Amino acid sequence: MTRKRAVRAAGLAALVAVVAALAVAPVAHPWIINDSSSMPVGLYALDPVDRPIVRGDTVVVCAPPAIAALSAARGYLESGACSSNTAPLLKLVAAMAGDVVELRPRSIEIGGRCLGSSPTFEADRTGRPLPRIPRGRYRLRAGQLWLWAPAERSFDSRYFGPVDAGAVVHFARAMIVGGPAASLARSNGPCAG
């Protein structure tokens, strides 16, 4: 076995051991396992919302009611603890009150800076039409958040617009994830095209 394979095998064994231990032991700190492709797959610790929310925070948030209903009907979200009886979303806070978000067909600009790869699609992977908010500029009002995730097909504010900050139920910290933790990977300037 090569050294690289041995290191990978040891890492996988450690992850399996941690997850198994958490599954059978009482845990004082709440956690979730994200298996969605929107954010890095892995184990996230949940922290209370006991401080102001800032740009770049990873949050656990209940989807707006109409979006939660659509997500449940299409199988995007499992059942869970939100008032809509759906599981919450795991997203990054990309913008907040006072920020100007420009939604374009292939990108999002916040305050004139490009936010990673952020196309909007007409349909989901199975061909069903996705909800759309009009492309254009949005100035977020007090108490509003623009949610985003780095995956191109993430179901986030580019489809349902800003959400109420009161819908945030936890902060989340990546503990053991497959790949780098998600961040607001913005360029230094406006989006191309």
Image (cartoon, rainbow, N blue to C red):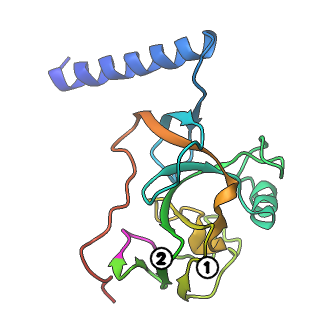
Q: Quadrant of the C terminus?
A: bottom left
Spot occupied by residue 184 in the image (x, y as percentages of width and height): 37, 60
Relative vertical location of residue 108 with respect to residue 73 in this rendering, above or below: below
Viewed as shown, does residue 79 lie left or right of 123? right
Instruction: Tell me the SS state at disc 1.
Output: loop
Q: Main secondary structure of the magenta part?
A: loop
Q: Residue at x 44, y 60 (%)?
A: 55
The residue closer to the viewer here, 30 or 15, is: 30
Spot occupied by residue 95 in the image (x, y as percentages of width and height): 48, 68
Q: Which residue is mark 2?
A: 99
Q: Nearer the viewer, mark 1 or mark 2?
A: 2
Relative vertical location of residue 6 with respect to residue 71 in this rendering, above or below: above
Q: Which mark is residue 104?
A: none
Q: Which residues are magenta?
A: 114-118
Report if the CB atoms under discs 1 and 2 are less than 8 Å apart: no
Relative vertical location of residue 4 with respect to residue 163 in this rendering, above or below: above
Relative vertical location of residue 56 with respect to residue 82 in this rendering, above or below: below
